[in-house]
Amino acid sequence: MNINQIDQDNQTHPPLEPLRKHCRQEADTANIARSFADLISQLFLHTSQEDPPSRHINVALEGNLGSGKTTFARYLIQALGHDGSVKSPTYNLCEPYLVINNGLEITIHHFDLYRMQTPLEWEEAGFAEYFDYPGVCLVEWPEKAEGTLPAFDLSVRLEAISLFSTDDSEREITLKAKSASGEFIISRL
Ligand SMILES: Nc1ncnc2c1ncn2[C@@H]1O[C@H](COP(=O)(O)OP(=O)(O)O)[C@@H](O)[C@H]1O
Ligand SMILES: [Mg+2]
């Protein structure tokens, strides 16, 4: 089954509305990231039967400093099969992870473009080919690339609920599909 078929079968057009999830605590964010990872695995199992397999997904991670982008990425990368720590790629722009997920080898590239000086620095660093690898690209601060990145399949925006809240663990997560693969995930989350 290819992704277009999946799309037709589920009749997800016209485009899905953004999906909003309320998180009272970090454990809720962790659960969403784990479900997300599970759906990436399902998507890759479907597309692995394609010839050639189109096993790739680009995810934009949006939100202010401290909103939880790296935290979300950490739970996602670990749920995909990485057995170890996940540090913020703030200084070297990109951290790669190779995992085995459902018997499939997946490369995850976790980017943080916050410190980029010019929009095309990611390309000059040779990162463009990572967006073609079978696997997952997670990009914090995609706006720093000013629209020069390849298309995203979906975006995940994290927002602290209230600046004045005494409970600073509350977050709203908004997920938007931008492709059939993105719709596959968001319609099942
Ligand atoms: N519901 C939540 N979701 C995500 N992170 C949370 C949540 N509640 C508290 N946190 C904390 O907020 C901080 C988010 O930091 P980080 O993930 O580095 O943010 P960013 O990458 O967006 O700058 C972490 O210390 C994390 O433990
Ligand atoms: Mg971060």
Image: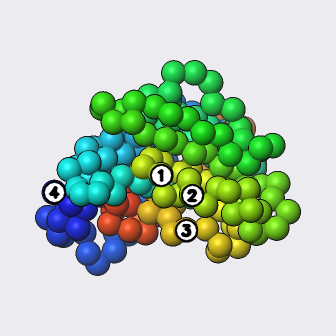
Q: Which residue is mark 3?
A: 150
Return the disc, 3 or 1, that comes first in the chain's sequence. Answer: 1
* CB within 8 Å, label 2 to label 1: yes
Which of the 4 image quarters holds residue 80? top left
Question: Where does residue 97 sit, x and y in percent of width and height?
Answer: 55, 35
Q: Which residue is mark 2?
A: 129
Question: Where does residue 107 sit, x and y in percent of width and height?
Answer: 49, 41
Q: Which residue is mark 1?
A: 133
Q: Could you classify mark 3 by the number of other residues whose Cα lies within 10 Å: few (under 14), some (14-19), or many (20 or more)?
A: few
Callout in the foreground (4, 1) = 1
Question: Where does residue 182 sit, x and y in percent of width and height?
Answer: 38, 60
| Residues at marks 2 and 4, CA–CA distance in whole angstroms | 26 Å
Callout in the foreground (2, 4) = 2
Is 129 displayed left or right of 81 in the figure? right
Return the disc, 4 or 3, that comes first in the chain's sequence. Answer: 4
Q: Secondary structure at mark 2?
A: helix
Q: Which residue is mark 4?
A: 1
* CB within 8 Å, label 4 to label 1: no
Q: Secondary structure at mark 4?
A: loop
49 in relation to 7, above or below: above
User: Amino acid type of disc 2?
Assistant: Glu
| Residues at marks 4 and 1, CA–CA distance in whole angstroms | 21 Å
